[in-house]
Image (cartoon, grey):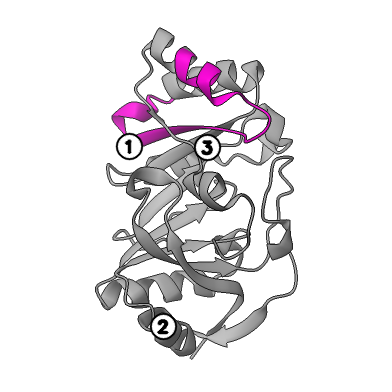
Amino acid sequence: MNSVRITEIFFSLQGESNTVGIPTVFIRLTGCPLRCGYCDTEYAFTGGQKKSISDIIAEVESFGSRYITVTGGEPLAQPTCLELMTKLLDLGYVVSLETSGALDISGVDSRAVKVMDIKTPSSGELSRNLFSNIRHLNKNDQVKFVIGNDEDYTWSKRILSEYQLADRCEILFSPVMGQQNPTELADKILQDKLPVRFQIQLHKLLWDDARGK
């Protein structure tokens, strides 16, 4: 059976997306072609350990949770990620994929919930956005904008309108911890009546930047 290079597998509360607070098994894949300025998982860029998909599934089963998040790094940088997700879905798990939006998502199993970033200017990776991915999103998916400053906010509002994203899927606006004041961002969303979900990274409020949380 095919293998996947894994940085860590751990059990925690979902800190983001519309399942925030739900106990979830996280499968963090190794490797990422992007270098976002606000990245908090640089340790997943290299290293890791190759594991067979059957071994990964066995480890996931030991946690006893039906919610699985496949994350990174950038999971789609490893093609075998697609097989892993499909096998988990076939077993009845609720699977979400956290992806940068820089790689093609068309091959992702339609049963998986895609949580896709659209990179804002402060990420330093604006040119990597693959906007053709938008047509592969459905109502169960989510698009996330990570907001670091006023420029990011204004730019994100424009993209939200230009691509009519709120008509396609759920939209998340998330402040960069320690950079964008969350109250100020919340006030802007209310003032502009944006059709988005404001989110703060719950896991960072609870455990700061501890790994495996």
Between label 2 and label 3, give the one nearer the viewer: 2
Q: Can you tell which quarter of the image residue 127 is in?
A: top right
Q: Circle 2 is placed at which residue position?
A: 57
| Residue 28 in the image, given as x and y percentages of width and height | 56, 67
**From the image, which quarter does the C terminus lie in?**
bottom right
In this view of the protein, can residue 137 be seen by the observer?
A: no
Badge 1 density bin: few <14, some 14–19, many ≥20, Cα 10 Å:
some
Q: What element carries label 3?
A: helix
Question: First in sequence: mark 3 or mark 1?
Answer: 3
In this view of the protein, can residue 31 be seen by the observer?
A: yes
| Residue 192 in the image, given as x and y percentages of width and height | 42, 10
* Image vertical order of residue 168 relative to residue 87, above or below: above
* The residue stretch that appears in magenta: 163-187
Residue reaching furthest left?
92
Give the residue displayed 37% in from the left and 24% down from the top.
164
**Is residue 34 found left or right of 133 in the rendered image?**
right
Q: Circle 3 is placed at which residue position?
A: 131
**Tag of residue 19:** none
Question: Decide: marks 2, 3 in contact (CB < 8 A)?
Answer: no
**Tag of residue 169:** 1
- Magenta stretch containing residue 164, yes or no? yes
* Image vertical order of residue 138 relative to residue 79, above or below: above
Amino acid found under the numbered disc labelled 2? Ile
